[in-house]
């Protein structure tokens, strides 16, 4: 099984939440603090926080940091071992459209357009080369 660098600190945070060391709505260390403490890259720390958010253990507050999530709401997935469902509301869908290529319309591969429509410079070269 592949291990990730962020597991160094996420396992510690998960254990602290389970043991009640950090309580609901407690602020977690910043990305910068964890980066220095565990000597990780910023992207590894961000990936770790995303992993914990997906598991429902923490929540993010823009420009404020990361906080321990309400464990009563997330208690069901702990019993079953499954991750909580992802909420797909309007904001989620809008962000998906902005961050993915899903907003582009697919172009059929068998599109039959004259080459001159796609590359007009080819038409001008053929016209110039075909005149004797």
Image (cartoon, helix red, strand yellow):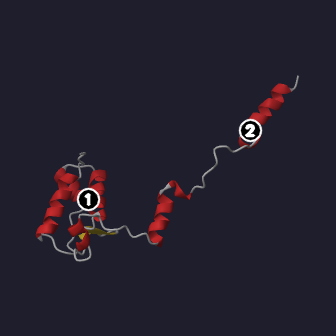
Residue 66 seen by the camera: no
In terms of image quadrants, where is residue 53?
Answer: bottom left
Q: Are marks 2 and 1 in contact (CB under 8 Å)?
A: no
| Residue drawn where x is 26% and y is 59% of the image | 31
Q: Residues within 10 Å of mark 1 (few under 14, many from 20)?
A: many
N-term mark: 2 or 1:
1
Furthest toward the front, the residue is 80
Task: Identify the image quadrant of residue 59.
Answer: bottom left
Q: Position of residue 81 (x, y in %)?
A: 23, 64
* Residue at image coords 46%, 70%: 91
Q: In the rendered image, is residue 40 in sight?
A: yes
Name the quadrant of the C terminus. Answer: top right
Quadrant where the N terminus is found in the figure = top left
87 on left or right of 124: left
* Residue on which disc 2 sits: 115
Secondary element under disc 2, as helix, strand or loop, is helix
Question: As rendered, which of 45 and 111 lies closer to the eye?
Answer: 111
Q: Residues within 10 Å of mark 2 (few under 14, many from 20)?
A: few
Q: Which residue is mark 1?
A: 31
């Amino acid at each position: 099984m592949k291990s990730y660098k962020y597991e160094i600190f996420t396992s510690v945070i998960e254990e602290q939440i389970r043991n009640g060391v950090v309580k609901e709505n407690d602020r977690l260390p910043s990305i910068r603090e964890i980066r220095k403490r565990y000597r990780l890259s910023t992207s590894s720390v961000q990936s770790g926080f995303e992993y914990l958010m997906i598991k429902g253990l923490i929540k993010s507050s823009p420009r404020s940091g990361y906080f321990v999530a309400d464990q009563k709401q997330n208690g069901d997935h702990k019993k079953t071992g499954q991750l909580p469902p992802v909420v797909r509301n309007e904001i989620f869908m809008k962000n998906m459209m902005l961050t993915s290529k899903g907003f582009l319309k697919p172009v059929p591969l068998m599109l039959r357009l004259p080459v001159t429509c796609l590359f007009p410079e080819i038409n001008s070269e053929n016209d110039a080369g075909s005149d004797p």
